[in-house]
């Protein structure tokens, strides 16, 4: 009787797992409840592994079923918890750079904490962050929620926020600044791509209207003569306060007070991101160059937007990382919303989340890519 019940539970877990995977592939604009079903996928994956262990101890023949499911769904497991022990080898040599190597850094810089309340914990954080980016060895920097004060700006901060000059020209990089707002004092908000490789093409992709949630790209000429395209994009924000989220699950009263409003905002964000990522996929499919993508997705690895990208590109963390790879610098644990992706022409050599740089609510990510040799012409 106990084995019969355990077997039924195993079948239910497998059914749950398959339904959750199906939910991941349904855009929220079509059927938004599927997005909530998709968020249960890591639980179903974990329970299926528990079933594998249980049946190995009880009946190895039955264990073959959840083991086969675990094998077939392993790429989904890797999306949330990457396992690559070889990358942890202490004597692992760093790859030698070539004229087809690209070192890429991505960061949501939270407007460099320009407002006083953002730098209460560390008043020097803007200076430290800008200096760290300027001195970075990365060939290409993709920055979201960018902020710059050009010459003639009347904010009274002097040279502190001359970020385009400090990260760009003074550091030997060209810059493409995609501005979404210039305020009355002359300060500029938007996103930016900095490159030590020549920028030979550029463009901006808006989602209905140009806001901080948009995309930009730059075509770069490598020393090898190859042209590549780097996309930098920021999908729809949650517009959810971290304190409200923590309060909602800390007590029943908090859930009743905050839960419904949070769910509405979460739903609106999911619907918007599903539209935005489909817009980007159409543009990606038209690109003839090898692509590297840097993104603040504002979405988890078990979401439609992540799934659409992971189906077409290599996720750098899932390819060579270890662990969860959380990128959110806040009270919510294990949240990875910042990602880098690479088209199949690239070999992902290294990927790192820079936890030593705590100056924003996002940790920067950095990676090294090697362009694979082009296949011989037929």
Image (spheres, grey):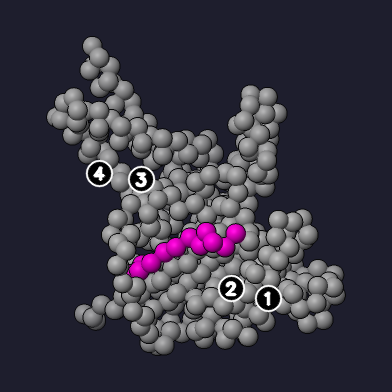
State the separation of the CA atoms marked 2 and 1: 9 Å
Q: Is residue 319 left or right of residue 272?
A: left
Image marks 2 and 1: residues in contact by CB distance under 8 Å? yes
State the mark number for residue 369: none
Find the distance from the CA under tag 4 to the CA under tag 1. 47 Å
Could you say whether the residue bearing mark 2 is in a helix, strand or loop?
helix
- Mark nearest the camera among 3 and 2 is 2
Q: Which quarter of the image is occupied by the C terminus? A: bottom left
Cα distance between the residues tagged 3 and 2: 33 Å
Q: Of marks 1 and 3, which one's residue comes earlier in the chain?
A: 3
Give yes or no for residue 357 being in the magenta stretch.
Answer: yes
In contact (CB < 8 Å): disc 1 and disc 3:
no
Q: Nearer the viewer, mark 2 or mark 4?
A: 2
- Residue under circle 3? 77
Rounded to the nearest angstrom, the CA distance separating label 1 from label 3 is: 39 Å
For this view, does 231 lie left or right of residue 341? right
Label 2–label 4 contact, CB within 8 A: no
For the point 52% across and 59% down, which residue is it? 355
Residue at numbered disc 2: 133
| Residue tagged 1 | 163
**Mark 4 highlights which residue?**
71
| Drawn side of residue 105 relative to residue 240, left or right | left
Which element carries disc 3, helix, strand or loop? helix
Residue positioned 52% across, 48% down in the render: 335
Marked residue nearer the N-terminal end (2 or 4): 4
């Amino acid at each position: 009787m106990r084995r019969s019940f355990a077997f039924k539970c195993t079948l239910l877990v497998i059914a749950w797992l398959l339904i959750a995977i199906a939910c991941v592939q349904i855009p929220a604009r079509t059927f938004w409840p599927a997005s909530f079903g998709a968020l249960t996928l890591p639980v179903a994956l974990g329970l299926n592994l528990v079933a594998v262990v249980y049946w190995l101890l009880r009946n190895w023949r039955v264990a073959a079923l959840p083991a086969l499911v675990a094998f077939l769904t392993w790429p989904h497991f890797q999306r949330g918890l990457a396992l690559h022990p070889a990358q942890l080898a202490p004597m692992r040599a760093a790859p030698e750079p070539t004229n087809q190597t690209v070192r890429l850094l991505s960061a949501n810089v939270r407007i460099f904490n320009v407002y006083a309340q953002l730098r209460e914990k560390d008043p020097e954080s803007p200076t430290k962050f800008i200096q760290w980016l300027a001195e970075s060895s990365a060939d290409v920097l993709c920055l979201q929620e960018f902020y710059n004060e050009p010459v003639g700006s009347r904010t009274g901060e002097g040279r502190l926020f001359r970020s385009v000059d400090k990260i760009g020209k003074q550091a030997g990089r060209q810059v493409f600044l995609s501005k979404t707002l210039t305020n009355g004092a002359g300060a500029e908000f938007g996103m930016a791509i900095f490159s030590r490789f020549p920028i030979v093409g550029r463009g901006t992709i808006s989602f209905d209207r140009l806001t901080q949630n948009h995309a930009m790209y730059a075509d770069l000429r490598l020393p090898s003569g190859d042209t590549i395209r780097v996309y930098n994009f920021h999908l729809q924000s949650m517009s959810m306060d971290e304190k409200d989220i923590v309060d909602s699950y800390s007590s029943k009263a908090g859930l009743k007070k905050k839960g419904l409003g949070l769910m509405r905002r979460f739903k609106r964000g999911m619907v918007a991101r599903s539209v935005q990522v489909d817009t980007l996929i159409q543009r990606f499919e038209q690109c003839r160059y090898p692509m590297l993508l840097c993104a603040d997705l504002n979405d988890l690895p078990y979401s439609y937007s992540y799934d659409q990208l992971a189906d077409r590109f290599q996720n750098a963390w899932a390819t060579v990382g270890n662990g969860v790879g959380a990128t959110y610098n806040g009270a919510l644990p294990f949240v990875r919303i910042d990602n880098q992706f690479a088209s199949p022409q690239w070999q992902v050599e290294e990927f790192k989340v820079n936890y030593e740089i705590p100056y924003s609510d996002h940790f920067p990510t950095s990676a090294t890519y090697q362009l694979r040799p082009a296949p011989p012409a037929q």
